[in-house]
Image (cartoon, rainbow, N blue to C red):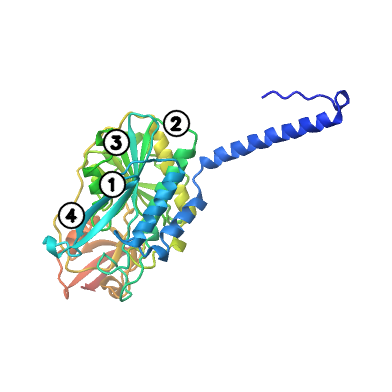
Amino acid sequence: MLIRFVHTNSIPYYSYVTMRSKIRLVLTTFIYLVNASLWAQEISETELKEHIFYLASDKLEGRLPGTKGETLAFEYIEKHFKAYGLIPKGEKGYRQVFDYTYNPNPHDTVKANGIARTGTNAVAYLDNGADKTVVIGAHYDHLGMGGSSGSLDKKKGKVIHNGADDNASGTAGVLELARYLSGNEIREESNYLFLCFSAEEDGLIGSKYFTNHPTIELAQISYMINMDMIGRLNDSTKNLMVYGFGTSPAFGENVPKNYAGLNIVVDSSGIGPSDHTSFYLKDIPVLSFFTGQHSDYHKSTDDADKINYKGQKLVLEYIAEVLMNLDQQEKLAFTPVKSRQPGRVTFKVTLGIMPDYSFQGKGLRIDAVSEEKPASKAGIKAGDIIVEMDTVKVNDIYDYMKCLGMFNPGETTNVKVLRDDTEMDLSVMF
């Protein structure tokens, strides 16, 4: 834009004022548009906080599938999908409804003993006219009032499980990436399908239903991004776990190992306890993001005021960079990964610890210890590394699970731990 200035002595004063006002208006408008464009391309901590405080509020009563609380959560997600101009891609608008039977006893296969439930996936589409689509997903359901739905809460009776980290944080991630990608004024080389799954807590039911009843061709999907518990980044360790790293050769070059101080811990496996598994089993590459376990997991204390919002913003900025790095790639090749599984191990006992899933050394590092459980009573502490149980070496979580399966209630065993590089032998009674 060329602006010609004329000395005021050569034109009437009122023309000078008019010209100056017009110039100011043009410059102000230009600055506003630049700022608006920059805002649209930034991940917003404010938006994340707004989403999580609503989705994890008592008003939604824990977002159990089929309840009024989950309906309110769906309507909130739908409202934002509409605001971002996304195309409805459910079976009816943004909605994909399914019925299923939930049984709190996983060993009871009698269908008549189950509980009939209805779940609703939220599905929206950003059409960039590309020949490939990236799925960005997270589950939005949680445990409702606790009861028989996997609650670890010590409080007696029914109590609201707000599920701020699990998984209002992931749902907020989907909404914020939807806003970011639909408003960044860039026409990416990929389309994006935004999915908020129901009934994940009951066994990945919503994502299984979608992959068996897809609303786009599965062959069109290049890869799937999953976010499950991304709201509690530890400011000391900065650990961000990325699962599915081995499911496509493209991830090795395009998923950064270093980013803004984050400690990126990769795991090759495409199978895990979240919705990315449903896509991996359809031969689709996956990446699943997780900031780590904590003592509020599946308890009524998983509340919005405990989320690390600055940390979650950083995680989403990292995911956005991964999306941009992969955008110029052709549809990604899928690589099956041999997943190390503990086998058919059943547990009659619990140690009462929370493993550190990001630990990469030998042994099982403990993130937290539950009060009044065998580990606590034996003197095991957070930060200890279990290296042996009953003379059996423990190199990782799989060894630990196998060892745990050997014991019955009332039995005693020796547990060897490393504490500050010192070996300690502790007696544990289950």
- Residue 38 is labelled as none
Dot 2: element: loop
Q: Quadrant of residue 333?
A: top left
Q: Which residue is mark 1?
A: 276
Cα separation between marks 4 and 2: 44 Å
Q: Quadrant of the N terminus?
A: top right
Please, what is the three-letter code of the amino acid marked with disc 4? Pro
Cα separation between marks 1 and 4: 19 Å
Cα separation between marks 3 and 4: 30 Å
Cα separation between marks 1 and 3: 13 Å
Q: Which residue is mark 4?
A: 342
Q: Mark 3, residues whose alpha carbon is within 10 Å: few (<14), some, or many (≥20)? A: many
- Looking at marks 1 and 3 on the same chain, the residue that comes earlier in the sequence is marked by 3
List x then y, in percent, for residue 181: 44, 39
- Residue 221 is labelled as 3
- Looking at marks 3 and 2 on the same chain, the residue that comes earlier in the sequence is marked by 2
Q: Is residue 178 above or below residue 52?
A: above
Dot 3: element: strand
